[in-house]
Image (cartoon, rainbow, N blue to C red):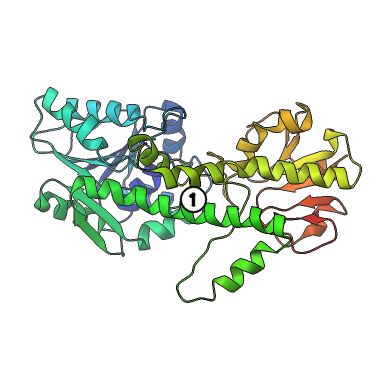
Amino acid sequence: MVNVIGLGYIGLPTALMMASHGVEVVGTDYNAELVATLNAGHTTFKEEGLDELFAKAVGAGVRFTTEYQVCGTYIVSVPTPYDKVDKKIDPAYVVAACETVLEVAPEGAVLVVESTVSPGTVDRFVRPLLVEAGREDVALVHAPERIIPGNMVGELLRNNRTIGADDPEVGRRVAELYASFCQGEIAVTDVRTAEMTKVVENTFRAVNIAFANELAKVCRVGGMDVREVIRISNKHPRVNILQPGPGVGGHCIPVDPWFLVGDYPETANFIRLALQTNASMPEYVLRRAHEAMAEHGIADPAKVGIYGLTYKEDVDDVRESPTLQMLESVEEHLCGHAVKVYDPWVERDVVPGQVHSMEEFLDGLEVVVVMVGHSQVKGRPEAFGDRILVDPRDVMGDGENVYKL
């Protein structure tokens, strides 16, 4: 039996995928309300294919509880935030979960940390727990997740995986467990290399996005279309520049690279600059909105609204979203006014000024900042009527009143 600890955006799909492929799985989470929702037959977030996977897993016998189980394998999939001051990982959730696992794990159990961590986290924070508890019989493994909201089910099935283990034989057994559903290549290596590869993957994307974002600023000053510059440059066989945008959100790219900066502050200078560039983009979009207002003689901040709260299109995930980052700067640019915000995917109240229908959102607005290219509006500027659009993701097409990066 496998006990998956943490039933959030990563743990729940992982538990469901294993259960639906013949593995006996119990999912555990400290959040009793979340567990009750799952046991009532409902998923806890929106994701394409998740409801179908949930139904299949329930039919296969997956169970949900707040209790840790006595079993042979534990998969810890809990959040790993970072301290925004010193940029170091906060391992508190991982440590708490592993401590509880060690209280119930039988001799010879395997403890798999799936949460993304900085290189050396297992050695610094998890391995000492085994020593202190006299549980060095428990095998430690790191198997970092590698999926993205919006396509979790497909990526769980098809993406390559990495298994880091002290004992290659244990690594092989854990690889076989993941191979119950994973169709991609599964590499087995040591723990610290597995930790590093996951952080490096997200750091590479963060740096590439930062390059695109800085190009956008350069092209704005130089009077060039950055998207056209990137399109043509990418025709080179060894160039693959990503697209600029209003910032970087989600559970990986805006967080994981800071682990390297926090742990290697004297070395990771280039990475730090890239992350600072990405972090500057919500403020940059606000300045573009201010320019649009000034050009059209609009002074009233109540006439400006923000479309999109999530960090990417057609998901309900608002973690680290550029819109939330932007709203932290609204006071400076829009005199503290609670800007009207709407996102068709976010049903719960997240920020002041949030409304829950397009009609209510558009009422009284003259400027809309389109932060997310949800399919509701992508390529459809008419969805906003004749309002001025600030379009940092370039999803609305060209138009006289469309302001891009």
Where residue 267 appears, x then y in whole percent? 35, 42
Q: Is residue 145 visible?
A: no
Mark 1, Cα crowd under 10 Å, few <14 / some 14-19 / many 20+, is: many
Q: Is residue 242 above or below residue 303?
A: below
Return the residue found at the far top: 132
Disc count in the image?
1
Residue at horizontal 12 percent and vertical 49 percent from the top: 170
Placement of 233 over or under 210, stated as above or below: below
Towards the viewer: 326 or 152: 326
Does residue 223 appear left or right of residue 262 in this picture? right
Q: Residue at x 17, y 32 (%)?
A: 127
Looking at the rendered structure, the kind of residue marked 1 is: Pro
Q: Residue 293's spot in the image, x, y percent?
A: 84, 43
Q: Residue furthest right?
A: 297
What residue lies at 59% left-to-right and 67% top-to-bottom? 230
Image x and y of residue 62, in percent: 32, 44
Front residue of 56 and 122: 122
Judging depth in this view, the residue of 183 and 118 nearest the camera is: 118
Give x and y (percent) for residue 372. Answer: 65, 50
Which residue is at a point 57% across and 49% down the rendered structure image?
315
Quadrant where the N terminus is found in the figure: top left
Q: Which residue is mark 1?
A: 149
Residue 103 placement: quadrant: top left
Name the quadrant containing residue 224.
bottom right
Placement of the C terminus among the 4 image quadrants: bottom right
Q: Is residue 387 visible?
A: yes
Tag 1's secondary structure?
loop
- Left or right: 322 as drawn, with respect to 183: right
Q: Quadrant of residue 27?
A: top left
